[in-house]
Image (cartoon, rainbow, N blue to C red):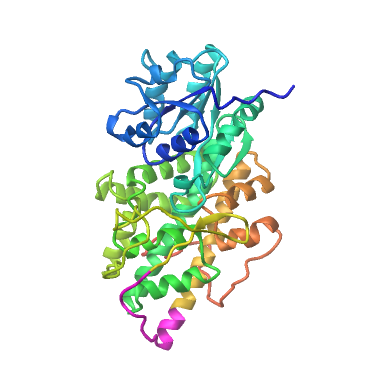
Amino acid sequence: MRATRFRNTERIGFIGTGSMGRPMIAKLLQAGYQVDVYDIDPAAAKDVLEKGARRHDAPRDAARDCGIVITCLPLPQDVFDNMTGEQGALAGMPPGSVWIDTSTTDYHNTIEIARRAAAIGVHSLEAPVSNLSHMGVDFANVSFFVGGPTEAYVRCETVLQIMGAISFHVGDIGQGQSVKLLTNLLFYAAAVASGHALCRSVREGIPGQQAWRKFVGSSANSVAIEQFVPFLLDGSYDRSCTLEITVKDMGLTVQLADELRVGLPIGRAVEKRYSEAGRKFDRYDSHLRVVELAEVVFGVRLQVPGYRAPSKYGANATHPPDQEFLTDPVGRIKPKREHVFPPDDVPLSDIQIHLLKSLVGELTYVNRLILDEAFDLGRGMGLGDPLIHDVITWSVGASAWSDSHAQQYGNEQLVDLVGAIAPPLTTVPQLICPCKEELR
């Protein structure tokens, strides 16, 4: 028997009103839902309160008598603290209600909270969010990877579709978090590699914006390059996400690989880079600060004088919200953004042109290698290749390589698309670690 979906006259509790949570709350309010919210920082809820949400002083009160309670919080401990205990959301949730966790957290944490929820008749879903474009959550352009009972998923599917663009039911509790880590791995590796490629370009006298345009228009392109590299070029390092989150995510990814006995050599090297950045910089600093490690090694600054990325999360916090959007060949929506670089492009020498061509080859190769590792993780979780392909395609980890090759995954040999010589498989590519590092 098909479960009845909640009507928009029913109440939804929402715990966490940060940059990811606020736009989802706004979408729910716009759809006519009554939303009760809690955040440890009362000021964080100001925007949604003005739009009609009701604020409470404890998670328990925000969740009381709600049919659905959604958490959107930074760290595993935050989720645990807000869901359990006398003031936790579970203390206010009625039997038959559903808890949906949209955080990226430790699935062991999720399983334990789900166990406690089941004891009082509350159903649990994990639904970590992946942006389909930079901060796509601002206009509901996100995907949810949902783990948990099918009946609970069907019951809440409408709510998920209101908050985002697409959702996938990927299996039991634990699978959603694991899939999210898989897609994040692709993004973080591409962010590190593209930052290093830019550093090499700038060191050889190629303006950063010219190198970036070359990468965007090539087989090396990815969500990380196209939509996040501009925050390196304007010197903001992207204010939408903290370094603390990326360090946490990569730590969880390596932990998952250990449990699944997956080698993950490139992923482990990426984790080391983020860990190093986490030790060097403030944990609340911007997540792309990891690339500054490479800037120091190469003795360059990627910031283009006078340029500001067309986003409120870049150097210009007053930039207006996106108004125009494009749909790519896959069907993903992204903002139509105009980039204005004050410095003019310069004529490039044959050596510089050859360097860019080689870097395109290296970036493409990194995208292929890290896709290998993402599929290894997915297969280790017991997921089929078609589902792995779908969640990668509809995530922040998508790349030109994954779009064009993942469906035929494992049925072909690597084709060097630009004639560059690929690094040997016994070493981590230098675009991940500026200095050669032997695999162990």
Task: Answer whether residue 351 is magenta in the image.
Answer: yes
| For residue 101, above or below residue 180 | above
Q: Residue at x 55, y 69 (%)?
A: 219
Q: Residue at x 52, y 67 (%)?
A: 220
- Is the N terminus in the top left, top right, bottom left or bottom right quadrant? top right
Task: Answer with the quarter of the image where residue 416 lies.
Answer: bottom right
Task: Answer whether residue 88 is magenta in the image.
Answer: no
| Main SS of residues in magenta | loop
Q: Position of residue 421 (x, y in %)?
A: 53, 74
> In the rendered image, is residue 104 in sight?
no
Task: Answer with the quarter of the image where residue 438 lies.
Answer: bottom left
Report the side of 372 relative to 226 (left or right): right
Report the side of 184 relative to 273 (left or right): right
Q: Residue at x 37, y 28 (%)?
A: 77
Q: How many marks?
A: 0
Of 392 and 228, which appears nearest the observer? 228
Q: Residue at x 31, y 34 (%)?
A: 46
> In the rendered image, is residue 135 in sight?
yes
Q: Position of residue 129 (x, y in %)?
A: 50, 41
Q: Tell which residue pokes out farthest to the right in this image.
A: 1
Magenta-highlighted residues: 340-355
Q: Position of residue 153 (x, y in %)?
A: 62, 29
